[in-house]
Image (cartoon, rainbow, N blue to C red):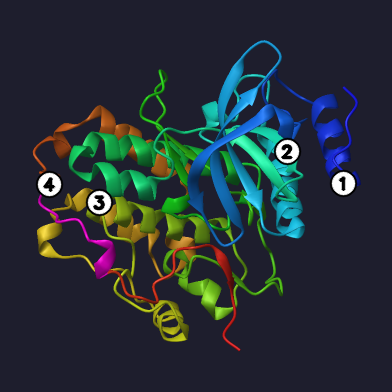
Amino acid sequence: MVFNSGNKNVNDMIIASQNNKKNDKDFLKWIQSSRLRILNELDRGAFGIVYKAIWYRRSYVNTVAVKFFYDDKDFLKEFTNVYRMIKRCSDEDSTMSEKNLVHYYGATYDHNRTEYGIVMEYYSQSSLSNYLTNKWKRIYWMEKLRILRDISYGLYTLHNQDLIHGDLHSGNIMIDDNKDDLNIAWIGDLGFCRDEEIQKKNNGIRGVMAYMAPEIFRDFPYTKKADIYSFGCIMYNISTNRAPFYDEAHNRRLMRQISNGLKPTLYQDDKIPSCFENLMHQCWNFNPKMRPNAYTLYKKFCDWIDDDELFEDVRWNTIKPVKRSDYHGEANYMSQTWSFS
């Protein structure tokens, strides 16, 4: 197929992805915007807006999600990371989706918006953040464990290739409880995904402050263990239905407190099983070397799912959901580069 995205780097990545594909699903395409019909907005962040859309293909139609970017540089950065992830993590035996990573179809350009976009699989519940908001009272502990099992496996897939996600939080976890397979959660939004850092790179403090590991604020390099800390914050969110530090201003003061070891608050009424709470605190260990790795987390959640007696008597509805009006006006859960000049 002859195409021209308008950007040589994008052209080269799409061609290389197709020429070097390892299975019949994990490769990138150029998708003409005329074949996409935008339906409604799903979510928005600091770098772009995600829409639900219909993709009219030659013989059938797909429901997809399309993320359009405000800035071409942010698009190119994320698309490059998607290309790198597929190149390293794809294999003949299983697809990205089976590895609990979001399935990406390719890129597009909307001439009316004058914006590039990334086309990906559509997930019925959008993000974990939205899922917790909309269905909290119907999410039993066993479903929480399945979600965390899937996230930890996706994280293991990245870490096994020496990639870090770099921006792991509940807004970047896609949820679909309507699929026919065993999975329910997938890791997405790879804008900050990169090689594990050996030395600190001079690229600012990037991500969602409330989910970031304390060593990042102390100018240490971003490693796999920083992703594990963020995973602990997702454990907190899914077990309490509170975003970490929801009642704090996300500013230099909070950054300094986190760097000194401040953790999200747990209350007696949260009724979190002790084994779960202990694992969460292991992920939050101030010493990154003492945190578990992603595969250990995955095995732990598999074991708990198999031995559900640990959780079957735990009531899931004792926690009152926090209302948006209860969030601090300066709490910010959009991924961004933080500047305190």
Query: Separation of disc 3 and disc 1 at Cα?
Result: 42 Å
Query: Separation of disc 3 and disc 4 at Cα?
Result: 10 Å
Q: Residue furthest top?
A: 59
In the rendered structure, which segment of residues is drawn in magenta?
317-326
Eyeballing the image, is 288 above or below 50? Answer: below
Query: Separation of disc 1 and disc 2 at Cα?
Result: 12 Å
Q: Amino acid at mark 2?
A: Ala
Main SS of residues in magenta: loop
Q: Which residue is mark 3?
A: 239
Residue 336 falls in image quadrant: bottom right
Report if the CB atoms under discs 2 and 4 are less than 8 Å apart. no
Mark number, residue 9: 1
Residue at disc 3, secondary structure = helix
Mark number, residue 107: 2
Eyeballing the image, is 251 above or below 325? Answer: below
Residue 294 in picture, x, y percent from top left: 47, 46
Please indicate whether residue 305 sits to the left or right of residue 40 in the image: left
Q: Residue at x 45, y 80 (%)?
A: 255
Q: Nearer the viewer, mark 3 or mark 1?
A: 1
Q: Which residue is mark 4?
A: 317
Query: Separation of disc 2 and disc 4 at Cα?
Result: 42 Å
Verify whether residue 321 appears in magenta.
yes
Residue 102 visible from this viewpoint: no
Verify whether residue 249 appears in magenta.
no
Q: Of label 3 and label 4, which has the lower sequence position? A: 3
Q: Residue at x 28, y 44 (%)?
A: 134
Residue 284 in picture, x, y percent from top left: 38, 63
Q: Residue 335 versus residue 284: which sits nearer the camera?
A: 335
Q: Amino acid at mark 4?
A: Asn
